[in-house]
Amino acid sequence: MSTETQATHRNPFQYIMDSKVKTVTTINGKDYLYFAGTGYYQLQSHPKMIQAVVDATKKFGIGSATSRTITGTTNLLLKLEEKIADFFETEDAAYLPSGYLSDMAGFQALEKTGIYDVIFIDEMAHYSNADGALVTGKKVVKFKHLDAKNLSNKMEKHLKNGEKPLIATDGLFPIWAELAPVDKYLKIANKFNGAVWVDDSHAVGIVGETGRGVYEYFHLNSERLFMGATLSKAFGAYGGFVVGNSNFIGAVKSGNVMTGTSSPSNAMVSAALKGLELVKNSPELRRKLWDNAVYLKKGINNLGIHVEDNYLPIVTFVTENSGEMERIQQQLMDKGIYIQFVKYVGSGSDGVLRMVVTSSHTKEQIDFLISSLKKLI
Ligand SMILES: Cc1ncc(COP(=O)(O)O)c(C=O)c1O
């Protein structure tokens, strides 16, 4: 192997999880108070979710060894799609093996239904959103992060007569927890006869009165709005989905992603059904999560570290350089606390320190994080 290859492909798997993901999680053989990841309700470890997986595995085995459009569709899968559509109050839904694929499937189906000619995408959109856009082979124009004015200007410049835009963005950005101004984007889409695509992976289940994500948060309802997301975060399961009208979802279901991949494991379908049920029937989880987020953010702000004062459970900050951030992460680990030092889309090249609070954390655990951090900054 050349030295260049060795230098550019360092082992990215520094931390090995040796347990279920919980408030106390085992990493590299040691227990840590865990403030990371995206399991906002920690349903990933809920006994009812685990039982759902065991039951479905006993009935269906591991997988179907065929795609959905051959014989890989089970009644359980159809039920899940019905329940996803119920949850998001849309006509129909399509379930996919991952959230990453939901963007690609969504863009391809929107293209088939003739919704757009040019994609305008937030420059910080998630990898799956950006990659999904590129795979269409359509013209893709990036606009400034969260900037509706810049988006409008780019449209004026790049759209030819009669061309329709698709505005693509994440709903809730994973690093800085910003909500995309989709209300403004919808107005722009209306003006240019276009549509909006949101990857709402981080917001579904936790944002909006009933957890339907950013569209619910902004009280939006329009035939121009489209959405895909994951079930692997708030819903505690696996797989992605796309929701919308039946024509669009029909195009997803007969599209390349659905046809070209094995049907998702029924174990995960069963977990997803249980996760949707738990989130839908337990609004107290959402209230507890919001309450914990506000509590943590207040504590962090009191340390003199400015973070947005809201109920979103992602709490991120930077110090002067990555070495310093790595030091803070390591010294917190010495005290038995794990937070992320992460380089990701939206973090910049130095990376950020990212904490995630869940509905399962106690106030004492949050206090311990704040007081430990206080001694290190
Ligand atoms: C915005 C966004 N979209 C998509 C994904 C991918 O979802 P999945 O893990 O189900 O493939 C992620 C996961 O991190 C994400 O943050």
Image (cartoon, rainbow, N blue to C red):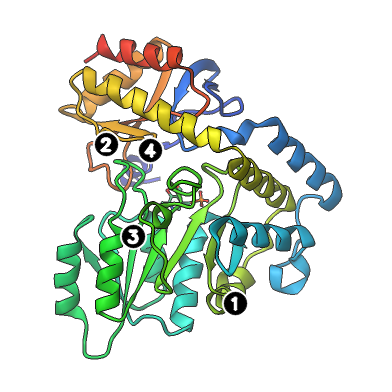
Q: CA distance from mark 2 to mark 4?
A: 16 Å
Which residue does the image show at 18% across and 29% down from the upper left? 321
- Lower position in the chain sequence, tag 2 or tag 4: 4
Please give the residue where the numbered disc 3 appears in the rendered image. Answer: 169
State whether residue 36 is above or below residue 160. above
- Lower position in the chain sequence, tag 1 or tag 3: 3
Question: Would residue 32 appear left or right of 76 to someone viewing this image?
Answer: left
Q: Quadrant of the C terminus?
A: top left
Question: Would residue 24 appear left or right of 144 to someone viewing this image?
Answer: right
Mark 4 falls on what kind of element?
loop
State whether residue 133 is above or below residue 267. below
- Label 1 CB less than 8 angstroms from ligand 1: no
- Lower position in the chain sequence, tag 2 or tag 3: 3
Q: CA distance from mark 4 to mark 1?
A: 42 Å
Asked if one can make out residue 96 in the rendered structure from this viewpoint, the answer is no
- State the residue in front, 264 or 191: 191
Q: Which mark, residue 10?
A: 4
- State the residue in front, 2 or 147: 147
Please give the residue where the numbered disc 2 appears in the rendered image. Answer: 351
Tell me the kind of residue under disc 1.
Gly
Residue 246, position as x, y percentages in the image: 58, 76
Please give the residue where the numbered disc 1 appears in the rendered image. Answer: 250
Mark 1 and mark 2 in contact (Cβ < 8 Å)? Answer: no
Alpha-carbon neighbours of circle 2 within 10 Å: few (<14), some, or many (≥20)? many
Q: CA distance from mark 3 to mark 4?
A: 30 Å
Mark 1 falls on what kind of element?
helix
Mark 2 falls on what kind of element?
loop
Tell me the kind of residue under disc 4.
Arg
Residue 238, position as x, y percentages in the image: 60, 48
